[in-house]
Amino acid sequence: MFSFIGILILGFFLGMRHATDPDHVVAMMTIVSRQRKVAKAGIIGAIWGIGHTATILVVGAAIILFKVAIPPRLGLSMEFAVGLMLILLGVLNLTGVMRWLHDRFTPSALQIERPDDLGLYNTLRPLIIGTVHGLAGSAAVAILVMTTIGDPWWSVAYLLLFGLGTVAGMAAMTTAMAFPIVYAGRKMFRWNEAITMGSGLISVAFGLFISIQIGFSDGLFSSAPHWIPK
């Protein structure tokens, strides 16, 4: 019993570490670069984690409890979607569309002072991004848990703790990321714009790297795809 509890606690901290994966950091950087409130950035990070956790729980539990097998082409397609999403987020930042969407769907100036008042756009955007990331990583986490923990229900409990750790880790990371961005926005407008443009370029470049690797190196576009969940 104590060993299982220890594994669950470990799952929480591994979830926090999982939040710092490069594709997660790049995606959230493109979002946080437009935020002007530190607390709001933390809440947005937590919402990303909720979307990520919900997907991992649903897909992971299906794999563990019902022995659902994910075909290689489908698994690669889920990971490929992350690359496309990063490219899209970067292009939206570079073209200014992200700013237009943020200004168009963010609460008014009076409401924006309240960090808990996000609006529909700032709620759905990280939720959808977290869901896409969860789809890409759910199989790897579930398979790892299955080979480590024999009991399926303890395995699902591990997924839940792992997900909660991811929520906490992403909330902490986006809060930390927001501090220099918010300061730059108040004191150095040009520096803030440079951060925004830089995050967009990084997102496009990293998204292209992932897409090319999955599409050609891993064989998504070939007749014989080879997929190793990661």
Image: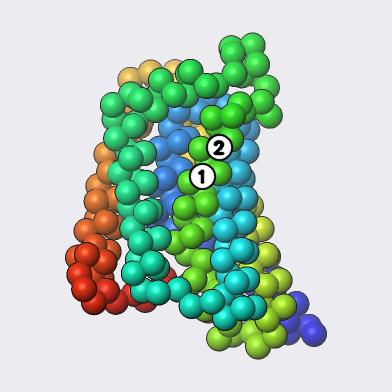
Residue 17 horizontal/vertical position (percent): 53, 62
Relative placement, left or right, of 78 versus 210 is right
> Residue 131: x, y in percent?
52, 52
Which residue was labeled with disc 1?
Answer: 128
Q: Secondary structure at mark 1?
A: helix
Residue drawn 33% across and 52% down? 83
Q: Amino acid at mark 1?
A: Ile
**Corner quadrant of residue 215:** bottom left
Q: Nearer the viewer, residue 34 or 195?
A: 34
Instruction: Please indicate, yes or no, whether residue 157 appears anywhere in the rendered image.
Output: yes
Q: Badges 2 and 1: C-beta atoms under 8 Å apart?
A: yes
Q: Secondary structure at mark 2?
A: helix
Relative to 57, residue 52 above or below: above
User: Is 203 situated above or below 12?
Assistant: above
Residue corresponding to mark 2: 124
**CA separation in Å, label 2 and label 1:** 6 Å
Give the class, few, some or many, for how many residues have Cα within 10 Å of label 1's Cα (few <14, many ≥20): some
How is the rendered protein coloured? rainbow
Question: Is residue 191 shown left or right of residue 183?
Answer: left
Residue 30 drawn at (x, y percent):
40, 37
Residue 77 drawn at (x, y percent): 35, 61
Looking at the image, which is closer to me, 177 or 77?
77
Residue 20 shows in the view: no
For the point 47% across and 55% down, which residue is it?
133
Point out the image quarter for the C terminus.
bottom left
Measured along the vertical axis of the image, is residue 176 above or below residue 184?
A: below
Q: Quadrant of the N terminus?
A: bottom right
Tell me the residue at 38%/18% (across/down): 189
Question: Which residue lies at the image location 51% right of the left edge and 66% below the top edge?
Answer: 138
Q: Amino acid at mark 2?
A: Leu
Q: Which mark is residue 176?
A: none
